[in-house]
Amino acid sequence: MTDMHKSAKSTVASDKTVERFTADERAAMKERAKELKAASRRSPRADKTDGESDVLAKIAEMAEPDRAMAERLHAIIKAAAPDLSPRTWYGMPAYAKDGNVVCFFQDAGKFKARYATLGFSDKANLDEGAMWPTAFALTELTAAGEARIAALVKKAAS
């Protein structure tokens, strides 16, 4: 075969030990597939209440101190942006507007990170100039941090 006509098979690396995704990432993708399947079976009216029970169940599965932080974040987000619908997203508590995830909480144990994360999707209305943060590391919740999170969530959902 000439170089131009080599089969795709011959150009693939032969090292089979390379993994594209970690076991945690694959588990998150499987959870997302389950979420999509469950959502397709739900009625639109049941979505908000079912979503909240799913979020509370995911929070209950977390280890401390992330569980306490997630419970507090859930309350802050519901108070700051009551129009956001709780739901799970890749197995994480998330909050959506018009079906699109606006923000989510990733506990430190999810991907064995050293801190939890409050993240915002591209659907969040946080645009500020040419550059702005879309995720925040959380090690604890202080009164000042809670106030900042409430303001960010309110802005993100606007």
Image: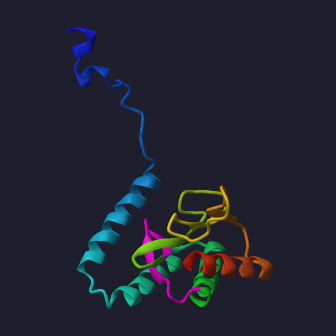
User: Would residue 35 appear left or right of 80 to someone viewing this image?
Assistant: left
User: Would residue 28 appear left or right of 59 to someone viewing this image?
Assistant: left
Q: Is residue 92 magenta?
A: yes
Q: How many labels sit on residues?
A: 0
What quarter of the picture does the C terminus occupy? bottom right
Q: Against 150, is 21 above or below?
A: above
Q: Is residue 136 magenta?
A: no
Q: Main secondary structure of the magenta part?
A: strand
Residue drawn at point x = 63 percent, y = 74 percent: 64
Residue 26: x and y in percent read: 40, 54
Residue drawn at point x = 47 percent, y = 80 percent: 55
Kindly indicate the quadrant of the structure image that contains residue 52.
bottom left
Residue drawn at point x = 78 percent, y = 82 percent: 143
Residue 18: x and y in percent read: 42, 34
Q: Tell me which segment is drawn in magenta.
A: 81-95
Residue drawn at point x = 36 percent, y = 30 percent: 16
Residue 110: x and y in percent read: 53, 62
